Image: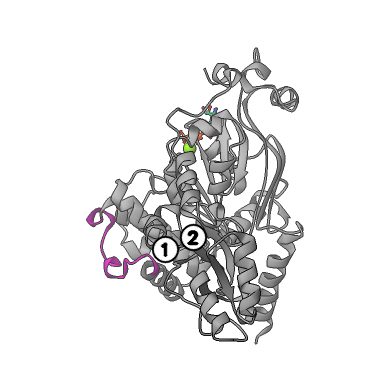
Amino acid sequence: MTDETRRRTTGAIRRRFDVGEGIVSALAVKSLYKIFGNRADEAVGRLATGAPRAEALAGLPATAAVIDANFEVRPGEIFVVMGLSGSGKSTLIRMLNGLLRPTRGSVRVDGVELTTLRPAALRKLRREKISMVFQHFALMPHRTVLENAGYALEVAGLPRAERRAKAMDALRMVGLTEWADKLPHDLSGGMRQRVGLARALAAGTDILLMDEAFSALDPLIRREIQDQLLELQAELGKTIIFITHDLNEAMRLGDRIAVMRDGRIVQIGTAEEILTDPANGYVAQFVADVDRTRILTAASVMEKPQHVLDVNAGPRVAAKALREGQTSVVYVTGPMKRFLGTVTEDEVLRALREGRPNLDGYVSTERVRTVAGDTAVADLFADCAQSQHPVAVLDERGRLDGVIPRITLLSALAAATPDEPARVDDEELVEAA
Ligand SMILES: Nc1ncnc2c1ncn2[C@@H]1O[C@H](COP(=O)(O)OP(=O)(O)OP(=O)(O)O)[C@@H](O)[C@H]1O
Ligand SMILES: [Mg+2]
């Protein structure tokens, strides 16, 4: 192992561990403000009280695009920023790589404070750490796809051969190897966007900023490129800040989602957290139309299994459990708590009659379907219908995590499809108007 690889490996390991303890994240934003116009300091002072934007800035010749943003992004995470047009998403992302200078607050990239860097140091940091993909990615029309993909490396002054090799590699990742020598006008919109992605990947930076990168694409193409990004991400583990105003895109891609409204981040959480526990009426209304059965998982609706026995339990113990639990079935686990199946009253009686020391040989795998905890609720219906007893939810080691009785699934579904729109506080309606 060379010193360089050792340094990088330990660096990566250290980062991963530190983040849990809140020491170093890939990107950290604290009390960040961007005010356009005049009397910015006065505007910050008024906004810092938490007053709504319009009220705080009344009479000031200033626009508050980002107000008191605070968040940390973990290495390897896809962090989505979602919000309606004008909510401040692009302004926020442009402060993350220093394209816009914040009015107030801190941005740290890999622990380095970006807001006080001199221009040359900022350019270096951008070149080495952060790449950006925009919605309308400007490809240079007279250069080949390969040259476009390698553009950032050309700017960085890499020798031609190295540049081509890296650009070729990036084109392979996005599935455009065969188009390397074509010109941009030969490509479809989706392909051009993939060249934009390839350019960012060729730069080899750990952080990717993507501002509405897929928003101009047709729905089908868009889904394809989203899938491609997720596949690439599984392989590359980049840190991605992804901006979108599309809720479904946000839910599909985001490990966590920050919802912005009028310059403020109003909630940060996983798709599931935002759906099940929206921070306010605004967020609730925002997510009202989402198909919850696609977002909610088996783990989120399962219940604690009540009647579980080890396979070494004797039939008398099993009979007692059945009687006391007023149930006709118990779930049986084996070594390492792995789920084995179920036994019913009939089998327990048989084991008793036959004088068996334990339940071994009486456990059936037929009557209960098993699913993984991250199975979408939408995909549980068939299993629930075919399972005689509540579906068993297993963890990645095959241990019994929970059960889902049919009635639980049905009530989760009923809760997930409100027939009235989500309630919005009057105050919030007034504010939104
Ligand atoms: N250079 C600027 N000068 C003045 N105001 C600006 C400037 N850039 C953005 N703004 C204002 O800041 C607010 C946030 O704009 P921003 O472009 O960040 O929103 P956005 O969420 O990216 O919107 P969209 O979804 O339309 O891209 C808006 O009110 C906008 O008009
Ligand atoms: Mg924008």
Instruction: Reply above or below: 404 against 86.
Output: below
Residue bearing mark 2: 390
Query: Which label was assigned to residue 387?
Result: 1
Instruction: Reply above or below: 426 against 306.
Output: above
What residue appears at the point 59 percent right and 59 percent down from the top-left corner? 326
Q: Residues within 10 Å of mark 2 (few under 14, many from 20)?
A: many
Residue 382: quadrant of the picture: bottom left
Q: Position of residue 230 (x, y in %)?
A: 45, 61
* Res 203 seen here: no
Magenta-colored stretch includes residue 177: yes
* In-image side of 128 versus 48 (left or right): left
* Magenta region, residue range: 173-187
Q: Secondary structure at mark 1?
A: loop
Looking at this view, name the residue that lies furthest to the front: 353
Magenta-colored stretch includes residue 354: no
Residue 327: quadrant of the picture: bottom right
What residue appears at the point 61 percent right and 71 percent down from the top-left corner? 319
Q: Secondary structure at mark 2?
A: loop
Q: Quadrant of the N terminus?
A: bottom right
Q: Position of residue 46 (x, y in %)?
A: 73, 22
Q: Position of residue 433 (x, y in %)?
A: 52, 17
Q: Amino acid at mark 1?
A: Ser
Are the residues at dot 2 and dot 1 in contact (C-beta closer than 8 Å)? yes
* In-image side of 77 versus 195 (left or right): right
